[in-house]
Structure formats: C-alpha cells, structure tokens
Image (cartoon, coloured by chain):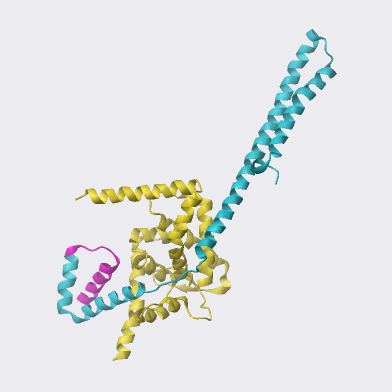
Chain colours: A cyan, B yellow
Amino acid sequence: MEGDKRFRELIDRSFAEEISEGERQLIRDHIRDCDGCKHYVELTARTIRGLREFTFVSGADSNAQVREILARHTETMRQHNVQFKVWAAFAVALSMSIVGSALVYQMAKLLTVPTHFDTAQVQAGVLVFWLLPSFCSALCLLAAPGENRGIA
Amino acid sequence: MSALPMTLNTTAETETAKIARGLRERDMELLADLVERCQHRLVRYLLYLTGRREYAEDLAQETWIRVLQRGSQYNGRQRFDPWLFAIARNLAIDYLRKNRKAVQTVSLPDDHDAVLLLPSSGPSPFEAAARSQDAMHLAGRLQILAPLYREALLLRFQEDMSLPEIAQVVGAPVTTVSSRIYRGLAALRSAFEEGDSHGG
C-alpha cells in the first residue's frame, strides 16, 4: 500500500508537471501489474479530460464592450494629461513673468537717473511692455483652442 | 537541434517586448488585439475564481481598465497572460473582501483561508458550460470546490501554464501550487470514483 501511495504521487506529478523519462517508464512498468494504479491513471486522465470539456460562451458583444470602455478611458486619461500639462505650463509661465518683471524693474530703476525717467514712468513701462504681455501669454495657454485648452 | 528552441524563445521575447511597449504608449490597436485574444480566457478564469458569471464579466472589464492604467508596470520579460491574470486575481480578491455578505470563508488544508462566494440560486456556470457527460459530472464538484483549487486546476490544465507561471499569478510558492493541483484533482477524481462505486 505504501508503494502504491508513492506511485500515485508520482502519477499525479506526471500529469501536473514534467517528470523524467525514467520515472515515466517506472509508472508504465508498475501499472502493467497493478490494476489499482492503472485505474488511478485512467481516472486522473478522465478528470483532466473532463476539465477541458467546459466551454464558456462569452457574450457576443463582450469584446466590443471592453474595447469601447477602454477607448473612453484612454480619452479621459489623455484629456487629464493635457490639462495637467497646460496648467503646469501656465504655472511656469506665470512664475517666470513675475520673476522676469521683478528683474526688468530693477534694471529699469538703475537706468532712471541716466535716462531722466521718473520711477512712476518706469513702473508703467514695465507694467505695459513686460508684465501684462507675459501674463496674457500665460493666460493664452489656459484658453488655447481644442485639445490644448486647459480650462475644462 | 538547439537552434529551434532559441528561435522560438527570441520570438516570444519580441512578442512580450512589443506588448510592453504598446502598453506603455497606450496603443489602442494593441489593446484591442489583446482583448480579442484574452477576454474569453480572462472571463473563464474569473468565473473559476468567483463561481459567478455576473461578477466575472464585471471584474474582467475592471481588469482591462487596470491594464490600461498600469500598463507601464509590465516589463515584457515574462509572458503577458500571467501578469494579466495576477491583476484579475487581485481585483477579484478585493471584490470578495468588500462584499463580505456574499461570501463565506473556508479553511484549506494548506493553511490558507479562502473566500468563497455563496452559490447563486440559478444553475451553476459550470453546469451551463459542461460539454460532455464527464464534464457534467465534474460541474457539481467544481461549484463546491474551494476557488484556490479551482484556479490552480484551470491555470494548469486549461491555460497550460507552467507551475512557476501559476505561482506568479497566485503569489504562492511552486510547492503550494502543486499541492493545490493534487488536492483539486483528488477532489474531482472522487466524483468519478463515487460514480463508479454507485454504478456497481
């Protein structure tokens, strides 16, 4: 009986995983003389054959439905991605326009004495010719047409 | 003699690398192709895991969305199918944990607990799918068999996955996987043994 148990474990292994040719021959030799183990091999083979005889019919439109869902999700993810990029560009443009304006203002202030300009005139110049245009450019990124638009 | 396996191996690598690249780039054509190839088997796997048709279809859709979102995590070094099934498995387990009312916990001999969906009132999906007398014989057993055994049997004998691939899907050692296969086979084999003894 102990021998049969060992053989049956080997038989199970032969169905589930790779065994050596020597082990296969051992099984063949054994089942030639052992009806119990021969029956065991037949039952196991029948069980595995039975397992392969299940046919699950998936819904006719199942694949199409999945493809449609994926297409929708891809579009949503793409839009999120574009929005993120535009907002990031806006943030960079805004901070650059503020930093740039501060630098230009400092430089223009240095030039007020030699050019005989008032501080107020310099401020107005920086505002009109630097800060406003760069701020508008940053806003344009958000209001870009079509898929480049950042505002939902 | 050794040239053929090497060629096959290279082809397989190219195929998985192509899938990995397509998933990273969210290539819809590739995804559609993967759906065509794998959806049917994915639903079948989830059916074996949950025992319920209605959950299997929903979970399969969720799985594909996850593939789309996390496609860049597939490295292309292993086959795609085990990676896909592992995602489906995690989703199914999460689902079963969230829906505790619909499940019961069963203890398995290999020191694992398994969550099992309570059977629905209609005919089992296994009975509906049985295409032979023997399959019909096994259907009842499959319905009450712990899902961990059911999935091991499916992955080995229907998906023809190797033991290491199954281990990758289920996140367990190869020895545990083979023990589940043997126990599952023993449980199903007993259906025929009983049939034979009743028959005479």
Q: Quadrant of residue A97?
A: top right
Please determine whether, in this image, residue B199 is positioned above or below residue A36.
Answer: below
Residue shown at the point (70%, 26%) measured from the top left: A99
Residue shown at the point (60%, 44%) measured from the top left: A81
Q: Is residue A81 left or right of residue A131?
A: left
Image location of residue A15, percent across then percent down: 28, 69
- Mark yes or no: residue B63 visible: yes
Residue A11 falls within the magenta-colored stretch? yes
- The stretch of residues the image draws in magenta is A1-21
Image location of residue B187, percent across then percent down: 36, 77
- Mark yes or no: residue B85 visible: no
Image location of residue B45, percent across then percent down: 44, 66
Residue shown at the point (57%, 51%) measured from the top left: A74
Instruction: Please state which of residues B100 and B71 is positioned toward the viewer in this rendering.
Output: B71
Q: Quadrant of residue B165?
A: bottom left
Please determine whether, in this image, residue B149 is positioned above or below residue B25.
Answer: below
Q: Is residue B139 left or right of residue B2?
A: right
Image location of residue B137, percent across then percent down: 37, 81
Residue B193 falls within the magenta-colored stretch? no
Q: Quadrant of residue B100?
A: bottom right
Please determine whether, in this image, residue B163 is positioned above or below residue A120.
Answer: below
Main SS, magenta residues: helix
Report the residue that reaches farthest toward the top. Answer: A114
Q: Is residue A127 left or right of residue B6?
A: right
Q: Image quadrant for the C terminus of chain B? A: bottom left
